[in-house]
Image (spheres, coloured by chain):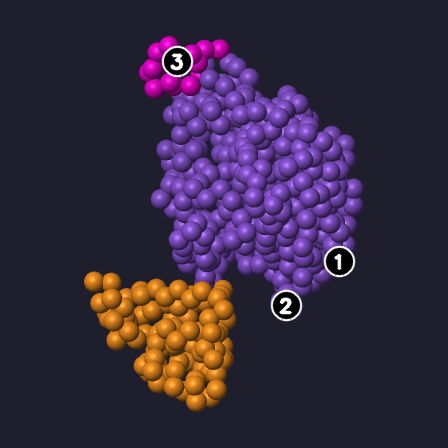
Chain colours: A orange, B purple
Amino acid sequence: MKPIERRAFLTRGSMAVAAAGVVTAVPGLASGLVAVEQDAPEAESLAAEAAAAGETLTMDEPIVAHVRDLATGEIGLFSGTREIVFRDPSLAARLFRATR
Amino acid sequence: MSSHREAPEISKDPVADSTDLYAFTSYGNPANVTIIANYVPLQAPDGGPNFYEFGDDVLYEIKIDNNGDGQADVTYQFTFATQVTNPNTFLYNTGPILSLTDQNWNRRQTFTVVRVDDKGKQTLGTNLACPPCNIGPLSTPNYESLVTSAIHDLPNGGSVFAGQRAEGFYVDLGAIFDLGILRPFQQLHTTFGLQNTGLGAMAAGVNSTKGVNVHSIAIEVPKTDVSKGGAAPTDASSPASVIGVWTTASRQKARVLKAGGTDVASGPYVQVSRLGNPLVNEVVVPMAKKDYWNSQEPANDKQFTPAVLNPELAQLLPVLYPGVFPNLEAYNKGTPKRDDLVAIFHTGLPAGVVAGFQNSMGTVQADMLRLNLAVPVTKQGASNLGLIGKDPAGFPNGRRVFDDVTTIELRALAGATLPLVDPSFTPDAAAGQITPGLTTGPTDTTAMGTENYLLGFPYLGTPYSGFAVPAA
């Protein structure tokens, strides 16, 4: 599997999803999961990068996030027919706190 | 039932619930194979105003293994889309439906067929029309003509159809699920000591599925489209002439219900229903593993072998019918090792077990409907008992629409096939007679006139109309 181009992924996501910190997501995960634990930049910096590149972040299909494990920060992102798994304990904690 | 509502979770999801799977050499074209996968069980024909349909959010697949590893080498994928002509009426149709483009037909489905193999995907057809459900003499006055229009040619040869048909599986549900009553033998049932049960003299079976409909996905393709290496299968003794077939239904992993009555689905598809051999998940796999079984690939089926080697129903028969199965009862008290059932369900029958026949691709244990493509169609004297009726063109060599799989499997479970692998075992006389009593005998291919199979594609009969067959 080859890593997806970050910029290409971001163009498919919204600002809110960019905040999820998917940086080196992996495509073609229809039959399996791949945990990709990478840096999790803040939404603002991702948005700034996109703006600097002249990109418009639009969401043309729903994205669903599943916080699988609060301790490890494992989050599954469902988009189209893909599932992207990554770890971001900080984001998982923030999402959890948002539900309290 | 064969696989209708056979597991707790899928019983709550009818549009994804596989009910029966058939695979056989096409009667009129021995170069082709026909595979039929049925879904949406037990349809009351008058179930309007929202009549039955496939799930737009379900991925239906027919999978074929041609090298014996229990994994798909060729897959046919089917996806559906629903169109509403007039959203401002509650009616399924606002007048007679005289064609598949009739504007009176308010809610219709189309489908796409994709073939997948190791070379990639090939779209075989898009925007293919399904027929409407059979409503009645005013709504669908020329139903057969609508069906004819809904049989689509495939670019590689063959045909495809997706839509409502008459249920072809016959079974006495009311009896078998009342603690294993077989009406023709009910006077021999233990009745658990209950008195005045009404179970007196022997009685004829009752076809519980007579008068209900189902949704079929039927595809007929050249055998060379599915055989190993694309070779024409001519040698019945060769494992390369055998294919294993199963069907699955899958849903996307996440579904979000939105305000306003809509929803969105996202994520990869997850298998929620599977069917290869009839009745296996129904009566062999224990309750706690049925939903799990539905999620698995055939290649992983060795994990279910213990339930096949010592099936619960084989243990129950001597208990429910005391004194009728003494040899089976004695065998059960040892260490049952039903390798005959493992062969039927999990590996196919290797050469040498049944004279002149085999349908095995190897030793990988995988629940698939195995069909030896080189076995010719039985044109005269076909037996609904298939191989145990000395008709090698029938179950468990694939499955034809008229095969009496319930009787075949009951007899096998009762020990009739055990001598194939254990010559020291003598089957009880009842093992060769046991039946739910829904046919007049092995040559009855209509289940006592309760089934109206066709002699050609799509083989299952015209669905019952809601007007003619209202729910009881």
Residue placed under numbered mark 3 in the picture: B197
Name the image quarter holding residue B49: top right
The chain that hosts pointer 3 is: B
Q: Quadrant of residue B8?
A: top left
Badge 1: residue crowd in 10 Å (few <14, some 14–19, many ≥20): few
User: Residue placed at 75% from the left, 58% from the top?
Assistant: B156
Mark 2, residue position: B120
| Relative depth, front residue between B113 and B201 | B113
Residue at x-position 34% and y-position 19%: B192
Q: Is B314 on the left-hand or right-hand side of A88?
A: right
User: Helix, strand, or loop for circle 2?
Assistant: strand
Amino acid carrying mark 2 in the image: Gly
Specify the principal SS of the magenta part.
loop
Q: CA distance from mark 3 to mark 1?
A: 58 Å
Can residue A31 be seen at all in this image of the molecule? no
Q: Which residue is drawn at the image coordinates 69% and 63% (left, top)?
A: B229
Mark 3 or 1, closer to the camera? 1
> What are the residue bounds of the magenta stretch?
B188-201
Disc marking residue B156: 1
Q: Label 1 near label 3: C-beta < 8 Å?
A: no
Q: In the image, what residue type sits under mark 1?
A: Asn
Residue ranking furthest to the bottom: A52
In space, the residues marked 3 and 2 are separated at their CA atoms by 60 Å
The chain ID associated with circle 1 is B
Relative height, residue A32 to residue B456 (above, below): below
Measuring from the top left, give residue B89's x and y in whole percent.
Answer: 57, 40
Instruction: Give the mark, 2 or 1, whose residue is nearer the N terminus.
Output: 2
Viewer-nearest of discs 3 and 2: 2
Image vertical order of residue B191 relative to residue B6, above or below: above
| Element type where label 1 sits in the image | loop
